[in-house]
Image (cartoon, grey):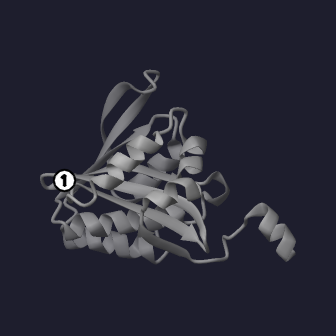
Amino acid sequence: MSVIERLLRRDHDDQPIALSALRRRDLRRGVLAIEAASYPRPWSPGVFESEIGQVRSGSRYYLAARRGRVVVGYSGLWFTGDEAHVTNVAVHPDHRRAGVATALMLALADVAIARGCRAWTLEVRVSSTGAQELYRRFGFAPAGVRTRYYENTEDAIVMWCNDIQEPEYRTRLDRLAGGGT
């Protein structure tokens, strides 16, 4: 593939994934476009700004994933008590199935563990089987359903992962970080 083809396709999969704190400027540099491509009712810029604003208080944590200078994904956590709630994990359609979501989840897991969380949870669309599989690899298991949770039309599966402070969980994360399942 020529350099021009790579630039036109914006194919940066050969570049390593770099993670950094999500900043307001990242919203216009790719996050809002990824959000729009990922969800039928995307978060508004104001919602993102509010979430990013809560990072200073310690109640939220957000990451941007980049390949080169291109924002290819983002994720977030909300902390409550000794639990962490995954608020979102989204990857640009051109960069899915390339390790971006796994890298984001590994980083979120490390933060949740460092914060002393005993468990973490999330909601995932019933139709999003790929995301459900990703979360299962991280030890999440279905615990319930939120009826018509998304856009008042689609159900969400509530998933929980407990005992994340245990050595066995660190072993799981180390396997995932090494490319294992």
Foreground pick, 112 / 31: 31
Residue 178 placed where, x, y %?
A: 46, 78
Residue 17 lies, with reference to residue 73, above or below; the image says below
Foreground pick, 57 / 155: 57
- Image quadrant where one finds the N terminus: bottom right
Q: Which residue is identified by label 1?
A: 83
Residue 178 lies, with reference to residue 48, above or below; the image says below
Residue 38 lies, with reference to residue 114, above or below; the image says above
Q: Tell me which amino acid carries mark 1.
A: Glu
Relative side of 152 to 140, left or right: right
Residue 138 lies, with reference to residue 110, above or below; the image says above
Which residue appears at 59% of the width and 48% of the height? 33
Residue 17 placed where, x, y %?
A: 54, 73
Is residue 161 visible to the viewer in this orientation of the structure?
A: no
Which of the 4 image quarters holds residue 162? bottom left
Which residue appears at 67% of the width and 56% of the height? 94
Foreground pick, 83 / 77: 77
Q: How many labels does the image show?
A: 1
Residue 3 placed where, x, y %?
A: 83, 76
Q: Regarding mark 1 in the picture, which secondary structure is present there? A: strand
